[in-house]
């Protein structure tokens, strides 16, 4: 067997080519350079949602392709998209022509560049007219973006040589779009769109067109480059445009170099890109390696350090369509171990920032303002406890627990608060009532009130906080919390439906409604597995295998649950699942004593890692045909409204490190591992795992051996974190 790479390159992470016709059920891909994002649409050149904070354009599209005066989409020719972290290559074949484009988010620039190549497959020379219909709705806002779609506004447009210049009504933002070849630019003549503009009704807008005439010899090719640059001033936007348009092919090369550097740094101790690193996985299991890399990429992808980011560096949650500049507490916590290892300094700042806010009043915060976004999510107490615990146990920064926050209370005192917060949510029983659908899974109407998941998580919060307190010498405080956990766990187990493998949700009228959802399976299994009897464990695993598991993915809700009729949003319903749920289900299987079931599932899950980083949801096979063997990403349009990528991808890193290898460091460090990796690869090794001030190798047989005895302590002095690219 050839030696497998230990650190991935952009080529190793390339998605499978996806060939589709106009408006097939294919989620449009995204690109990022950490300054902003762009959506690469179902066309040869079209892009949308060009967002470089503080400049945004909503979902407005531009650069729709025309060939010889006819809109490309009308030719009926299938278009092939090939995504890599550094680019998207699109190809289409028309009579006598082969057209190919390469789209990149230009490193270090608030700009997107597209290299367009046209090949004449005939014997005779011909002139080919390639037109781009251009539009923009650029606006800059100093306020938090509080909606799923980022702000946009009407722009005035003017021609400027072979480019168009779009300016917001309030002059807060400018978009410059043009080409690097002789071209004809003209305005559309269409009246500007009103402020009632909607992408779904009003289209993409029309500002004007740029047409390039290419003389292409028989059997030969010709090219031109398109650039879209944005900024908060005309001067800056023109400068960004000029720098990129001078060398569009060079922008593509720079993007490849940039992304290979990020990937190498992510797995290298002492690198200059991140404040930490991830261990290198050495394994003969291609599936395990692919899932591990998938999870790592899916967190790196969301790094944001644009000018004006109040945290210096943050990690967004979704892209490229929705909730730009927002970090959700829930999703961040699902990648908790990844953040603690890869970039602990911004994680520490993010945690303190959330502690300084009221996490019972929002689901996340804006990196533009630091202010709250959205309503309360029921997960927040568990998520915050998990985040602090993972940060402390992997970094060894136990002093953080004693650090006073803005309200004067220490982090340890906040842990006590989160561990007890559920008591204020009780109604007529000893369980916490977590409210209505909008506080929980949003599209499962029966999953409300006294759910097993978060009540089990409360048991875990109490025990985890007790362990941290005991390590600091507070035995009395730890004992008190453990006593409460022992009382609560019985009430959680009373929600179990004997013989079914599922749990009920207690309702305000005292009734119990059985819910056949993966989230109870995941969270009960990963938080209180040791409290379950062997019969309950077997029944839970049986339910999972019979009603939730599919060859390449997971049904979030059993199709045998009556609530399967309520919604078709695939992140939490019968037709698909949110990306972290399969990873957490595999962790639950291992905790419930069925590691082989989890390991046998991994090759199927790995086939789903073939469309770029994990999407906000993937369809199960019964709902949509797989793409080259992988569960298809759900698209952003109604009624699915799922984005192309989601930062909870780090759950797959946690699956590998914490469950498969069994690494479970405590606040005082790690001694040995107790995983199941030996069942599939007894020679596997995690190289260079940082735990506190130790750098260790973790072996399949459980050995944990030092590589370097002492590492430098985490720096607290640089508010901007590691060097930017």
Image (cartoon, grey):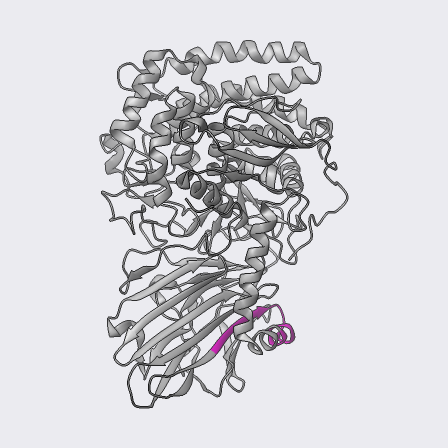
- In the image, 303 versus 687, the foreground residue is 687
In the picture, which quadrant includes the N terminus?
top left
Q: Residue at x 62, y 47 (%)?
A: 370
Considering only vertical position in the picture, is 575 above or below 200? Answer: above
The image position of residue 37, as x and y in percent, is 51, 59
Residue 130 locus on image (x, y percent): 38, 81
Look at the image and tell me whether residue 196 can be seen. Answer: no
Instruction: Tell me: 669 left or right of 601.
Output: right
Image vertical order of residue 333 relative to residue 67, above or below: above
Q: Please state the horizontal and vertical placement of residue 391, each as a whole percent of the image.
A: 62, 32
Q: Nearer the viewer, residue 396 or 599?
A: 599
Identity of the residue furthest to the right in this view:
717
Verify whether residue 517 appears in magenta: no
Residue ranking furthest to the front: 1
- In the displayed structure, 504 sits above or below 654; it is above
Write down the quadrant of residue 196 in the picture.
bottom left
Residue plotted at (66% across, 15% down): 470
Toward the viewer: 19 or 238?
19
Quarter containing the C terminus: bottom right
Q: Where is residue 106? Give x, y as percent.
A: 55, 66
Q: Which residues are magenta?
A: 225-239
Please state if 532 lies on the left or on the right of 97 as rendered: right
């Amino acid at each position: 067997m050839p030696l497998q790479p230990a650190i991935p390159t952009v080529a190793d992470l390339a998605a499978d080519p996806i060939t589709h016709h106009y408006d097939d059920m294919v989620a449009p891909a995204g690109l990022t350079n950490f300054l902003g994002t762009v959506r690469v649409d179902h066309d040869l050149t079209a892009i949308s949602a060009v967002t470089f904070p503080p400049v945004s354009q909503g979902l407005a599209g531009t650069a729709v392709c025309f060939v010889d005066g006819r809109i490309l989409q009308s030719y009926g020719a299938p278009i092939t998209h090939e995504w890599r972290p550094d680019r998207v290559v699109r190809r289409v074949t028309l009579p006598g022509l082969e057209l190919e484009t390469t789209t990149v988010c230009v490193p270090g620039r608030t700009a997107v560049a597209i290299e367009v190549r046209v090949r004449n497959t005939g014997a005779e020379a011909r002139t080919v007219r390639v037109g781009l219909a251009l539009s923009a709705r650029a606006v800059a806002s100093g306020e938090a973006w509080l909606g799923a779609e980022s702000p946009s506004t009407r722009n005035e447009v003017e021609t400027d040589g072979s480019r168009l210049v779009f300016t917001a009504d309030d002059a807060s933002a400018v978009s410059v779009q043009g080409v690097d070849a002789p071209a004809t630019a003209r305005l559309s003549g269409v009246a500007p769109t009103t402020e009632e503009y909607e992408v779904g009704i009003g289209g993409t807008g029309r500002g004007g067109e740029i047409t390039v005439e290419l003389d292409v010899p028989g059997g030969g090719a010709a090219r031109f480059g398109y650039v879209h640059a944005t900024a908060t001033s005309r001067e800056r936007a023109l400068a960004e445009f000029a720098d990129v348009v001078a060398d569009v092919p060079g922008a593509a090369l720079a993007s490849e170099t940039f992304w290979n550097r990020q990937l190498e740094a992510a797995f290298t101790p002492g690198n200059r890109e991140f404040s930490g690193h991830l261990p290198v996985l050495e394994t003969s299991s291609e599936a395990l390696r692919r899932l591990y890399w998938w999870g790592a990429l899916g967190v790196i992808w969301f790094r944001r350090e644009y000018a004006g980011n109040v945290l210096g560096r943050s990690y967004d949650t979704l892209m490229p369509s929705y909730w730009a500049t927002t970090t959700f507490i829930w999703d961040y916590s699902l990648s908790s171990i990844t953040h603690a290892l890869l970039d602990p300094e911004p994680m520490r700042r993010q945690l303190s920032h959330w502690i300084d806010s009221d996490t019972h009043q929002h689901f996340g915060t804006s990196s533009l303002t630091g202010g709250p976004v959205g309503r309360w999510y029921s997960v927040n107490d568990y998520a915050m406890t998990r985040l602090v615990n993972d940060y402390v146990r992997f970094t060894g920064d136990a002093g953080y627990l004693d650090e006073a926050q803005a309200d004067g209370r220490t982090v340890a005192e906040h842990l006590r608060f989160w561990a007890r917060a559920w008591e204020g949510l009780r109604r007529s029983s000893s369980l916490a009532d977590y409210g209505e659908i909008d506080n929980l899974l949003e599209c499962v109407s029966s999953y409300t009130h006294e759910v097993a998941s978060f009540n089990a998580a409360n048991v875990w919060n109490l025990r985890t906080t007790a362990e941290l307190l005991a390590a600091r010498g507070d035995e009395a405080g730890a004992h008190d919390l453990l006593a409460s956990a022992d009382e609560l766990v019985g009430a959680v187990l009373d929600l179990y439906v004997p013989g079914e493998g599922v749990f009920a949700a207690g309702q305000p009228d005292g009734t119990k409604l059985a819910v056949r959802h993966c989230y109870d399976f995941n969270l009960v299994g990963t938080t209180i597995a040791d409290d379950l009897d062997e019969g309950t464990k077997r029944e839970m695993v049986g339910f999972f295998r019979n009603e939730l598991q599919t060859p390449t993915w997971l049904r979030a809700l059993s199709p045998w649950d009556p609530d399967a009729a309520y919604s078709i949003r695939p992140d939490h319903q019968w037709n698909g699942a949110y990306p972290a749920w399969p990873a957490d289900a595999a962790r639950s299987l291992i905790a419930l004593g069925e590691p082989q079931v989890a390991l046998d599932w991994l090759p199927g899950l790995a086939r789903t890692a073939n469309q770029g980083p994990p999407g906000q949801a993937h369809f199960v096979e019964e709902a949509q045909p797989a793409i080259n063997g992988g569960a298809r990403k759900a698209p952003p349009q109604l009624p699915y409204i799922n984005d192309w990528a989601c930062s909870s991808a780090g759950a797959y890193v946690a699956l590998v490190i914490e469950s498969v290898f069994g690494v479970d460091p405590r606040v005082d460090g790690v001694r040995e591992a107790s995983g199941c990796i030996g069942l599939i690869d007894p020679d596997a090794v995690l190289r260079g795992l940082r735990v506190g001030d130790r750098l260790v190798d973790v072996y399949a047989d459980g050995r944990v051996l030092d590589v370097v005895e002492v590492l430098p302590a985490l720096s607290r002095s640089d508010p901007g974190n590691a060097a930017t690219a």
